[in-house]
Amino acid sequence: MAITTIAIIGAGPVGLAAAAHALERGLSPIVLERGPSAGHAIQQWAHVPMFSPWAFNIDRAAERLLVTAGWTRPNADRYPTGGDLVSDYVAPLAEQTILRDHIRLNAELISVSRVGFDKVKSAGRATAPFLVRYRDGKAIAKLTADAVIDTSGTWFSPNPAGAGGIPATGESEASARISYGMPNALGEARWRYAGKRIAVLGGGHSAIGTLIALSQLQAATLSTEITWLYRGPILAKAFGGGAADQLAARGDLGLQVAELVRQGRIHALTGFQLDRIEPAEAGLRLVSDDARNQTVTVDELVVATGFRPDLSPLRELRVALDPALECPPSLAPLIDPNIHSCGTVRPHGAVELAHPEPGFYIAGMKSYGRAPTFLLATGHEQVRSIVAELAGDHAAARRVELVLPETGVCSSTPRGPSQAKTSCCGGPAPVSVDACCADDAKAKAAGETGCGCSPVQGENREAAEV
Ligand SMILES: Cc1cc2nc3c(=O)[nH]c(=O)nc-3n(C[C@H](O)[C@H](O)[C@H](O)COP(=O)(O)OP(=O)(O)OC[C@H]3O[C@@H](n4cnc5c(N)ncnc54)[C@H](O)[C@@H]3O)c2cc1C
């Protein structure tokens, strides 16, 4: 079936890149964005410095459009904040190029299905157009399209605080004292945290970034108390690749937080399995369900336990997902933090991201499901390949046009920053090999189960939360 119109869900950087590639190939994209402007999710973490410099953050088709609109490329070596990413790239792309005629704002996806087909009906299914229903301001609207690319991200569906992936008992009742993701502790949320007792739950970059921001607040308001609640048994796992991370800013976060813990400015509790949240002493009592019965009383809780995809709008599509990660199954071995700790994911595209529903793809942050190591550069390569496939250029869809940096966090043994000198990955795995990195590919070719970078079960999963 010849593809003409593509519905793209979400005007984040990856959705806009998909639209730019579609226009270059003479296709007609329609981008639905739930927020009042493009980059709405990134605006929620506008204050956060990114760990990848501009060189890794700009899609090439998007750049070609921007250049025709007189845009000046930011310095490739500079590290933007989320706010810079929107003001210097996403907003000009959405507002100053021909993309603006293809974006519908305040348009929130409700559901995607096939016209006249529920999920069960097969005969003729592949040629039926997609039916996209969305909230258009206050009204309900619909459109049809030949293909759909869901690039709606995961920001608006954070994981809950409870250790078992479910809300802790009392979590919703305590919501006035809980923030999810990365609150702006040095900006608009300063009043909320200065001089307070704050717990940060999580082990990934969001948790570490928040801990570092709170420590800066603590330097100004000494009575600020910071407790780090870490689910895994070994805190050093959270410190990441340090000096071995090719994205130096990301490696540096781990080094900084390690030093703050060493100085005693951050009090860390390991093995903390949050079970319930109770009102206490003008604050919250956080109770862990672990052998030590750990309990901590705080004024505020920041939950930084990662994100999960919202799959509810996709209920009537034939979507194949890995049972653990909720990402396309063939992507799972490349990004599963249970079996591989590094973010050295080889570039991938239409083949790996295909679903049993022809013409439907999930790309960008959402394509990683619950896995945390997504990079924008990966998303740009994904949509370049997907759009090429939809346009019938199968050779371009299968070509790899991206080299990603290594994270340097790949290790089978817990280590501190001082040990983080080398990476075990050997770079991304070759294309068409079901392995997460070059060393993993070599080990599997030799009949072994993998490169041995597997961490203690469950431990690394937390270290890798976004
Ligand atoms: C704090 C933080 C820092 C990060 N730093 C880096 C970094 O340094 N380098 C890097 O490479 N990656 C980084 N990432 C990871 C990732 O690259 C970003 O999250 C990036 O924004 C993902 O782009 P996206 O387009 O896939 O999703 P998003 O940017 O999340 O965009 C999704 C869009 O879809 C919209 N949307 C959501 N639901 C709906 C709906 N139902 N209907 C319509 N629209 C909807 C949202 O409003 C949003 O505009 C970071 C992520 C976070 C959270």
Image: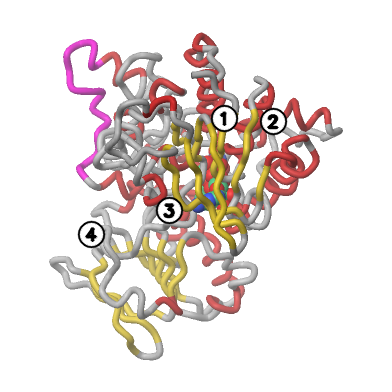
240, 273: nearer the viewer: 273
Residue matched to label 3:
258
Expressed as whole percent of the image width and height from the top left, the position of residue 360 reads: 44, 32
**Residue numbers of the magenta segment:** 443-457
Judge depth for marks 4 and 3 and give the one in front. 4
Q: Amino acid at mark 1?
A: His
Most distant residue in the left direction: 291
The part of the image, by quadrant, that contains residue 40 is bottom right
Judge depth for marks 2 and 3 and give the one in front. 2
Of the numbered discs 4 and 3, the one sitting upstream in the chain is 4
Q: Is residue 248 visible in this depiction of the protein?
A: no
Of the numbered discs 3 and 1, the one sitting upstream in the chain is 3
| Circle 3 SS class | helix
**Distance of mark 2 from mark 4, alpha carbons?**
40 Å
As drawn, the label of residue 62 is: 2
Residue matched to label 4:
164
Of the numbered discs 2 and 1, the one sitting upstream in the chain is 2
Q: Residue at x 50, y 77 (%)?
A: 224
